[in-house]
Image (tube, grey):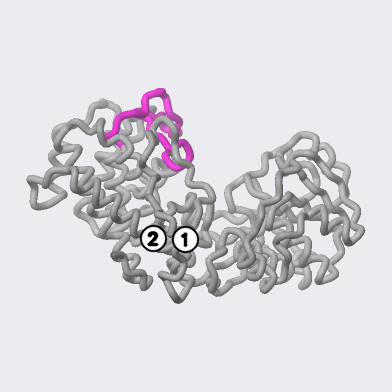
Amino acid sequence: MRLGIILTPDVRSKAYLQKIIFNKINQDMIIFLNDKRVEKNYNINEKDEAKKCGFDISEAVNVTLTKHNLSFKEFNFVDINHPELTEYLKHTQIDFFVFSGGGVLKSEVLSSGPRFIHLHPGITPQYRGSTCFYYSIINEDRCGVTAFVMDEGLDTGPVIYQKIFDKPNHIYIDEVYDAHIRSETLIDVLKNNRLEGKIFSKKTFEEGNTYFIIHPVLKHIAILNCVKNKTEFCM
Amino acid sequence: MKKIEYDYSDRDLLTVPEKYQMTAFEGIEFLYSYKKSREDVLKTIETCQYENWRDVVSEILDSNKLVSKNKMGQEKFVTRDLLNIIYKENVRTLEIQRRDLLDQIIKKFEIRKKIFVTYNNQFKEITEEYSDLLNYLLLSINCILAYQKSHNLRYLNTSLKLNDLIISQIKSLTEKNMMELCKILLQLELESIVELCRKKGIELQ
């Protein structure tokens, strides 16, 4: 089985790539969708929490790739449905690409040859859609990740593996916790050969919930639910 | 210390919708600010003449009879009628009724941040008109009802967004009973948030 990864210039890709390298997991092909965006600056606390979670949040994806002498194909856009990428994928001979970005894949890219794995921060079908980790933290004091094979639906593809995580004890959920739990689940999938010899057929969801972007009031309740001293974080 | 303001309903959200993407965490002060902001709006609305908020909604619905001859299952429908039907089937029951339809309208609002006046039976808008504030009020009351029944946060989430939008249009709420419905919505929303915070060990001032 041939494995590849499609990276984008964001925290999630940083965590995926750095942990794949740390765990010595071979990738047959690396594609980097790079729109040359300006790297965000992170404060010392974000850097510390990311370090505790096993990745360097301040190291750009292209820096990691270069540092480890990894060859990669670069495109100057981040759109997974871009026709140029679709055409390229047709000739890659890769069985599965891990896709770190977001959005729904169009039929053209889905039928280009390889299959695509996504790590969704929610246990499906109960938690489909956007910012599920916040809802799960409020409801259950924990969050799950679902690794699935992408299809044309929103978080409806056949499930490969699901893993549960405790809620974090810090406030950096968007940047650190999300990337951490997804990357840990990815490593679990890849290290334990959870893709090998499996036929992932379509699973239909008749029940469950599709969540939409969380309102800032609920987001604050979720984040404050993670920390002991609720009044400590006065900005 | 930086003063935190709740500003999610300050601009015209019908014209320039709020997407709520990657909103910043501003500490517990943000929740205090949210609560004060809602309480300030509530102070500007006269006291309800009804003892039971359900009576207010009933009066509004009675004064806005079904405006369409199109019933469920027809080729197109008027959104107000659909919200009216969903409300009436939900107001006196324990379980969420017409959940699929409610979820469809919520999805339309969450994606477009607008509620169009008419849709076809594929839930595609067939008009450009989206400024009927009664639709936003009725969807929000349906969401609050669904949240009270299910404690499913997705309904409270949409209601919060709808209420931000309604507040951003409050000067256009000219009818008294619509103002009263707005007051009811904000009271129910605030009660739900305070209770949720209490359960999570967050004390709102």
Residue at left offset 85%, top offset 70% = A24
Task: Give how far across and how far down residue B30 sits, in percent.
Answer: 40, 57
- The three-letter code of the residue at mark 1 reads Met
Q: Is residue B149 among the parts visible in the rendering? A: no
Label 2, secondary structure: give it: helix
Label 1, secondary structure: give it: loop
Q: Quadrant of residue A119?
A: bottom right
Classify 10 Å Cα crowding around label 2: few (below 14), some (14-19), many (20 and above).
Answer: many
Majority SS type along the magenta span: loop
Membership of A173 in magenta stretch: no
The residue under label 2 is B29
The residue under label 1 is A235
Residue at left offset 15%, top offset 38% = B177
Residue at left offset 74%, top offset 61% = A16
Q: Is residue B96 above or below residue A166?
A: above
- The three-letter code of the residue at mark 2 reads Glu
- Residue interval drawn in magenta: B109-135
In-image side of A200 versus A22 (left or right): left
Host chain of mark 2:
B
**If the image is split into quadrants, where does the N terminus of chain A sit?**
bottom right
Task: Give how far across and how far down residue B168 sits, in percent.
Answer: 33, 38
Task: Give how far across and how far down residue B139 sits, in percent.
Answer: 31, 42
